Amino acid sequence: MTAPVDPAAAAKGAAKGATGALRVRVRRGDGVQDYAVPRRANQTVLDVVTEIQREQDPTLAYRFACRVGMCGSCGMTVNGRPRWTCRTRVAAVAPDGDLLLEPLRNLPVVKDLAVDMEPFFEKWRRAHGYFEPGENPPDDFVAVPPDSPERQEVDAGIECINCGVCYSACDLVSWNPDYLGPAALNRAWTLVNDVRDRGQAARLDAVAGDAGCHSCHSHMSCTEHCPKALSPTFAIAGLKRETGKAALRRFWRRG
């Protein structure tokens, strides 16, 4: 089914410097719906989806917030690759004028391009991705020097905003739905290196199980697709080392 450009919208597009038309296919349930959208210079994929929703089809569901690459909520699969649509220029991903938009993989679809992030954040909780202070936090407070080895280990990882793009790109999540995923493990790694945290033992146990860091096959898909150029693969490798050390410590104590 094709939704043609509304004449009034097309005229408005021409006045704003439209240079042709895009063919946009949107995954909706079990099918794909076609739209034609005026093509413009410096147009982002999020601009395209917004124009469809506002000018042609108000029933199209998608998610966005900041529009400037700060919140990560506009993630979709664009021509087969998970991306932030607000930072993705149409000219870069669709030089032939053909866009296929689908929801992020590995997450339940709420409607159209909007997915349910609850499984993603539940795994974040399972990995103990929350700070655990001591019994009296004011007395336990420790300054973390920016140049300390621990802080430098996680200097990049703490910039993760939990957009879910790496989770969508991860083949292991597709194969094993119980796998904690790169974002949750990256968060666990940042806390393992936080000298103020008191939940290290439980956290290392949580990420060492069958669905944890040792299940990662280091395909590097999470690192390749991260919109912030972070490396969850590096964090997962660090967790593998630390869980191995913890296992050896337990072994020597028993011996």
Image: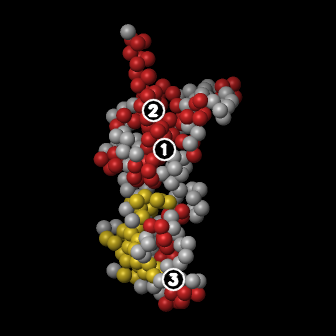
Splitting the image into 4 quarters, where does residue 241 fall? top left
Q: How is the image coloured?
A: secondary structure
Residue on which the image places disc 3:
19
Disc 1/disc 2 C-alpha distance (Å): 13 Å
Vertical placement of 138 versus 119: above or below?
A: above
Disc assigned to residue 41: none
| Amino acid type of the residue that numbered disc 1 sits on in the rendered structure | Ser
Count neighbours of disc 2 (C-alpha within 10 A) and say few if under 14, some if 14 to 19, many if 20 or more.
many
Residue 97, position in %: x, y? 42, 76
Question: Residue at left 45%, top 32%?
Answer: 239
In this view of the protein, which residue sits in the foreground, 251 or 141?
251
| Residue that sits furthest to the top in the current view | 255
Residue 154, position in %: x, y? 56, 37
Residue on which the image places disc 2:
239
Task: Name the N-terminal-most of marks 3 and 2.
Answer: 3
Question: Residue at left 33%, top 80%?
Answer: 1
Q: Is residue 161 left or right of residue 234?
A: right
| Amino acid type of the residue that numbered disc 2 sits on in the rendered structure | Leu
